[in-house]
Amino acid sequence: MPAEAYDTLAGVYEFLVPEPLLSPQGSAEAFAPFLDSLPPGARVLDCAAGTGLLAVGLALRGLEVVASDASPEMVARTRALAARHGAALSAAACRWQDLDEQGWEPFDAVLCVGNSITHAEGRTARRVALGVMAGLVRPGGLLVLTSRNWERVRAAGPGVEVAEELTVRDGARGLVIHNWELAEDWDAPHHLDVAVALIGEDGRVTTHTERLRFWPFRREALEEDLRASGLEPETSTYAPDVDRYLVTARRPG
């Protein structure tokens, strides 16, 4: 993922996060069923940490957490959130392909959530990223990954998606808009324009926009990529009619 990706959206990222995941506690609770097998005080890497909601939530539950993100702005927000909650974690601005250069000891679990892996530039880059993540998982450890249902997105076709209602965060009101540009070829770069239009009390509108590139994939292709990276797919919440799904994979050993 490019280092600058999501820098513009970092300040309004909470408008893109589902309400149940808006607090560190709520975010950690949502992922708890998939992390129940971890021992107390387990080492966890969140390598697509975003604003740090999940990383901070896991740290508050007693896990030893390292958070990383390609966006320095996101990492800054993660550190600020950890400080506000008194959570002990370390955070680094780091691309996936550089994770193995940080000198970190192996982790009991590596998380790549928030639909991040789609920003790896095609299947080769996706396998490189997953391979680096797999190398940071201890033998017997777990990788947890979430994704949009790209089969569903492509079936819906390109076009503009306007939220049906305003999103309210800390008293601020915003309208979220997505514009999908889908290539004919699955392996070609696709584009998503994201806009968050903040509506002030005086009616004035301030808009934050960012154009993101992504490379979608089928569910079966992701499973193949995980195996090629040395991981064994374990569970999946995929269904044809869901918007997003979660997969877990384990490193043999």
Image: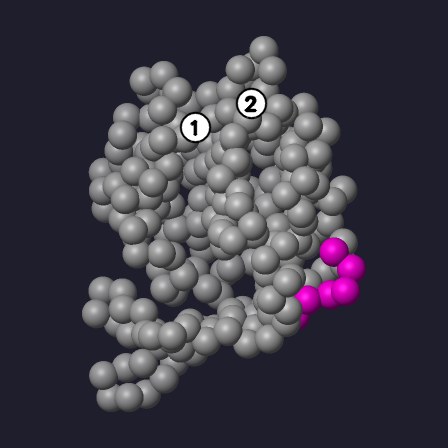
What secondary structure predominates along the stretch shown in magenta?
loop
Relative to 214, 177 lies left or right: left
Relative to 166, 47 lies left or right: right
Residue 4 at least partly seen: no
In the image, residue 110 lies at what x, y percent? 50, 30
Relative to 48, 96 lies left or right: right
* Residues shaded magenta: 181-186
Q: Nearer the viewer, residue 217 or 39?
A: 217
Label 2 neighbour load within 10 Å: few <14, some 14-19, many 20+: many
Q: Quadrant of residue 229?
A: top right
Relative to 18, 46 lies left or right: right
In the image, residue 73 lies at what x, y percent? 45, 55
Residue 185 at least partly seen: yes
Q: Which residue is mark 1?
A: 44
Q: Residue at x 63, y 25 (%)?
A: 231
Give the residue type at disc 1.
Val
Asked which secondary structure carries label 2, the reply is strand
Q: Residue at x 69, y 35 (%)?
A: 225
Asked which secondary structure carries label 1, the reply is strand
User: Which residue is outermost to the top?
Assistant: 253
Give the residue type at disc 2.
Arg
Q: Nearer the viewer, residue 217 or 12?
A: 217
Label 1 neighbour load within 10 Å: few <14, some 14-19, many 20+: many
Q: Quick check: marks 1 and 2 in contact, CB under 8 Å?
A: no
Q: Which residue is mark 2?
A: 250
In the image, residue 251 lies at what x, y percent? 59, 20
Which disc is residue 24 wearing? none
Q: Residue at x 35, y 59 (%)?
A: 14
